[in-house]
Image (tube, rainbow, N blue to C red):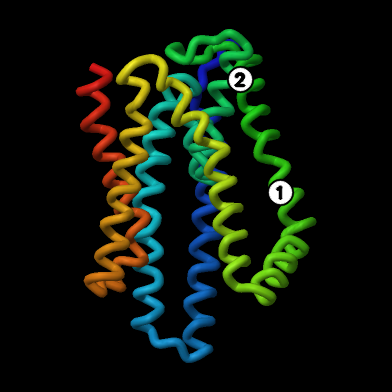
Amino acid sequence: MNFHPNSTILFVLAGAVIVFVIAQSLFFLIRAFRRGNELGIDKKQLYRTVLSTALFTIAPAVSILLGVITLSKFLGLPLPWLRLSIIGAITYELPAATSTANAIGISLSETVTDPSVYTAIAWVMTLGIFPGLIWVPLFIKKIQGGLMKIKNKDSKWGDILMTAMFLGMISAFLGMVFADIRSGLKGWIPIFVLLCSALIMGICGFLIKKCNMKWLENYALPVSMLGAMIFAAVITPVIGG
């Protein structure tokens, strides 16, 4: 039996799941909008909320698209399209696929044609993210309750704890940023991109606080992400050559 990661049946299966997710999203969006009207929230405020939320998704969507393109060279289009359309965790999907391929001894520059290899990678990507489906419903209330207790006792310590948790989550991926710094200037590209993103975020913060541009609060993150992506697209060919 011939196998190809871009077979029609895989496109049909992935497309069906994605259509269902989109339909579900639209359903709850309409329900939320109607509920907002019932609560007497101004329609202009609702439209602004929807617009700012939609704009906020642009930067992550661009990075996800780049992830789909990157993985499609190796795994075909349907699987990355399905995974990243639903989960959207490019910081997980790429390392999971890469580590599995390295463990099996498969080159990332060639399209997978062995169904056992394709299945193994798909299982690792799936099982690796699956624990979140269990831990969240079981422990989220206890975690949130503990955080709220700390925040109610001392708001500053509560903010520090939340920031520490966020930085702890981010630091789990810093290994990918610093992994190749010994390989020369090319290995510093992720560092330069990280610093560029931080600089843009700092400029946005300055404009918000010093220039009273409060409207920028909802767009600072996507602006910094898009700016860093553009910077990466420019600097990579120059340094990586």
For image coordinates 26% across by 74% down, the residue present is: 212
Instruction: Residue 237: name its quadrant.
Output: top left
Horizontal placement of 50 versus 209: left or right? Answer: right
* Secondary structure found at label 1: helix
Depth check: give the residue in front, 153 or 168.
153
- Callout 2 touching callout 1 (CB < 8 Å): no
For image coordinates 20% across by 23% down, the residue present is: 238
For image coordinates 43% across by 13% down, the residue present is: 109
Q: How far apart are the two marked residues, 2 and 1, measured between alpha carbons?
A: 22 Å
- Residue to which mark 1 is pinned: 133
Label 1 CA crowd tier, 10 Å (few <14, some 14–19, many 20+): few
Label 2 CA crowd tier, 10 Å (few <14, some 14–19, many 20+): some
Q: Amino acid at mark 2?
A: Thr
Q: Amino acid at mark 1?
A: Leu
Q: Judge whether 137 appears above or below 92 on screen.
A: below
Mark yes or no: residue 11 visible. no
Horizontal placement of 142 versus 15: left or right? Answer: right
Horizontal placement of 175 versus 53: left or right? Answer: right
Instruction: Residue 139: name its quadrant.
Output: bottom right
Depth check: give the residue in front, 163 or 79.
163
**Percent coordinates x, y for residue 48 in the rendering:** 35, 74
Give the quarter of the figure containing the C terminus: top left
For image coordinates 51% across by 21% down, the residue present is: 5
Q: Earlier in the sequence, mark 2 or mark 1?
A: 2
Depth check: give the residue in front, 140 or 129.
140
Depth check: give the residue in front, 85 or 94.
94
Q: Judge whether 225 appears above or below 219 on screen.
A: above
Mark yes or no: residue 161 visible. yes
**Percent coordinates x, y for residue 128 in the rendering:** 67, 34
* Residue 100: image tag: 2
**Percent coordinates x, y for residue 23 in the rendering:** 52, 58
Horizontal placement of 221 versus 29: left or right? Answer: left
